[in-house]
Image (cartoon, rainbow, N blue to C red):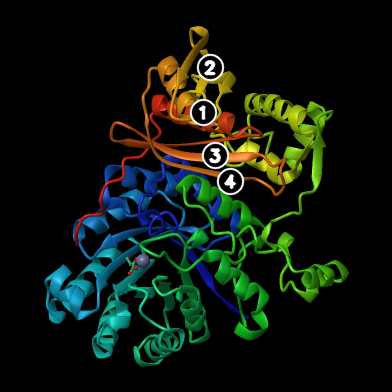
Amino acid sequence: MKHIKIFDTTLRDGEQSPGVALSVPQKLEIAHGLARMGVDVIEAGFPITSQGDFDCVGRIAREVRGPVICGLARTHKTDIERAAKALEIADQWRIHTFTSASDVHLEFMLKKTRAQVLEISEEMVKYARTFCGDVEFSAQDVMRADFDFVIQLFNVAIDAGATTINIPDTTGYGTPLEYGRLIARIRDEVVRGREVSISTHCHDDLGMAVANSLAAVENGATQVECTINGIGERAGNTSLEEVVMALATRGDYYQAATQINTREIYRLSRMVSRHSGMAVQPNKAVVGDNAFAHEAGIHQDGVLKNKSTYEIMNAEMVGREAGVLVLGKHSGRAAFKKALEEMGYDLSNVSNDHGLSEESVGALFTRFKEIADRKGAMGKEELRSLVETRDHTIPEVFKLESIQVLSGTHVVPTATVTLATPSGPQQHASSGDGPVDAAYKAINHLAQVFPSLESYRIEAVTEGGEALGEVSIRARVGEIIYSGNGVSTDIVEASARAWLEVINASLANVGVKKEAMQAI
Ligand code: KIV
Ligand code: ZN
């Protein structure tokens, strides 16, 4: 079996999704999750674009162990220096420098001739090598470029010291057969094409990113660049979970394998969806709500007799345990802690990325009891949602004590909210356009913080009428965007909890100001 490296770019290309801005704690949480899942490379960001991105790449380089940590840089000296500075603290790091290959990019974006691009690429790959032995070189828009120029460019880059050459189909233009052939030609016609890693980077404009990446693997690529849930510029990138599960399920055909712990996939998918505010479509392969659901009677009958009748992989392989009941309303603290430990949380080491402090466990247990009292029992997914919808690093300056709402067809929606505040419990009632709006106004009044809502999303954690509702929002305070999550049996309460997380995050200053990527 050929080893395929998984290069995750959720934190760089994924964050370029319209409307997505991840805060530093969110990026760190995702990076730790990716490391636990076993990706080979994490592209942590594009350090030249902002001080925030530089600092965040630096923190990931310092704190995340296991994968190679990579930073993006144009073929500019300052970009490369900035990337090297942010990354140098990592155990293993990579500079990823890129230019463009197509004439349309050269003429309108770079405003350079082919000869100039060749010269600059050679010089900048050499320069990057003065900082780091692991240098990746990309040429954007290869699918629409002149093939002879592409070969020249990669020859130059390898001779200058590139250790990985990346072949981006930046605009998602290629078809699988075409892109696969292109990769084979690069492997065979670039003089030292077989001495370096050949990487694929596909966009999903025509819905072919995963198929194209797999075609590349069939034709010699040894690295796949991808993102969790396929998020990214425009229609997104190759989706990590689909490529990984295609290789895991059809290793017989591809004769290739990754080192990914597939049982971490679902958890990462939920985490990225929650933090990015981007819902996963129900029929999305591998991670969508319906991916393992059987509706037709004939299918249900088959699956009940033997799962393999209609399932080519099972839900457990990607970490989607069936709603196994773990705890009920009579469960005590010890059983609660044991369940958390069984789910992989570390209660003995808070500094561990998966660690929970005694205080957090205490607060979670109180919430668990409140919910279990109303709901009766909670499954693993619900417990996980309870733990992971709350950012345990943000101090709870304001905390929800109670909420009461009055709403209906012929009444003005009103919410009465009681918060625990630094000066004791405070209560306020407000009216609004709906019960959620009324609750937000009451909270704003009590906290004297006035965020404006940018996006709001609600999802049921599990199936069925008794499911917990998980609310994810993004809201702006001044220039900064904050995200918040809340979970409850009551969707207004879940919404209020998410809003309070935004307010507490704004007080702790852990938001993100999304700065536009500099023009190339
Ligand atoms: O799509 C693309 O071409 C990129 C490069 C920067 C690798 O994201
Ligand atoms: Zn891209």
Q: Quadrant of the C terminus?
A: bottom left
Q: Ligand 1 quadrant?
A: bottom left
Q: CA distance from mark 4 to mark 1?
A: 18 Å
Q: Residues within 10 Å of mark 3 (few under 14, many from 20)?
A: many
Circles 4 and 1, Cβ within 8 Å, touching? The answer is no
Along the line of sight, which residue is nearer the eye, 490 or 133? 490
Q: Earlier in the sequence, mark 2 or mark 4?
A: 2
What mark, if any, has residue 459 been given in the picture?
4
Can residue 343 be seen? no
Per the image, the residue denoted by label 1 is 435
Q: Is mark 3 within 8 Å of ligand 2?
A: no
Per the image, the residue denoted by label 2 is 416
Mark closer to the observer (2, 4): 2
What mark, if any, has residue 471 been given in the picture?
3
Q: Is residue 406 left or right of residue 134?
A: right
Residue at the (82%, 27%) spot, across then down = 332
